Image (spheres, rainbow, N blue to C red):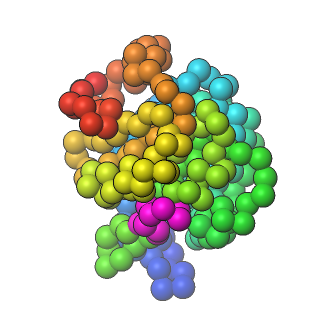
Amino acid sequence: MAVLWSKDIAGKRYEVRSAGNTRRLYTDGVFHSQYHPDRPFAGSIWDLLWLPALFYEPGQIRRILLLGVGGGAVIHMLRHYAQPEVIDAIDIDPTHIQIATRHFGIKPSSARLIQADGISWLEDYKGPDYDMIIDDMYGEEAGEPARAIDLDYSWINTIRKHLSPNGVMILNSMNSRELRQAACFTDRQLSRSFQSSYQFYVPMYHNAVGAIFRKPVSVRHFRKRLNDYPALRQLDFRIRKLGTDMQKY
């Protein structure tokens, strides 16, 4: 794998690597993003962040908030499969935003990139609700990825406040246990705000991605939408309705 660009900034090591036309972002050795311009999917956990959009018809998700940009690979997928009017993408690291625009093809027409602390930004936000809020905020600790904030009552409630009545909250957690301990499942009052929840994962990663919906959704509709795109049939991932047996696609 070739290193296309690298730089040490404020004590962090950034690298953009290539494998053919694939671009990968590493920060302090942690793998943050992967994108191939000619493929509709990455074959990794980043697919799980946009796949829940297939529970909706194109255009039904009008406003998306992405907390944690990395290289911005998921933005390309959201634009293609969700077809939103707005994507606001927040990252605390200004270098990540520069890399997203220079090396991962994120243009002003793709998303509004905002350099800010995503936690404080959402806590202070006063604008219209979002139909999809993706929490993918990760940093690095000793060369390993680490979530930026616990999925406790305060944080989940902050997300809920800015989610539309038909919206979905997507949480990228370190593992299944962390996801199940999120306040949207453990707090009885908060759990009443959500009607459906699914867990996504891919075999080669420990991460568990939760898609928690404020309205009832149909996995049958999800399967139909998935089958509308022949290229997506190559995806190797698992989905389960939380509390039911695992299903394979």
Quarter of the picture containing the N terminus is bottom left
Q: Nearer the viewer, residue 147 or 189?
A: 189
Q: Residue at x 73, y 60 (%)?
A: 125
Q: Residue at x 66, y 40 (%)?
A: 164
Quarter of the picture containing the C terminus is top left
State whether residue 48 is above or below residue 25: above
In the image, residue 105 lies at what x, y percent?
A: 61, 47
Q: Residue at x 40, y 22 (%)?
A: 219
Residue 87 visible in the snapshot: no
80 sits left or right of 190 in the view: right
In the orientation shown, which residue stands out farthest toward the bottom? 11
Residue 129 visible in the snapshot: yes
In the orientation shown, which residue stands out farthest toward the front? 189
Query: Residue 196 occupies which quadrant of the picture?
Result: top left
Examine the structure image and report whether residue 85 is included in the region drawn in magenta: no
State whether residue 55 is above or below residue 30: above
In the image, residue 210 lies at what x, y percent?
A: 40, 44
State whether residue 127 is above or below residue 57: below
Q: Residue at x 21, y 30 (%)?
A: 245
Which region of the structure is painted magenta?
A: 147-155
State whether residue 181 is above or below residue 48: below
In the image, residue 55 lies at what x, y percent?
A: 50, 26
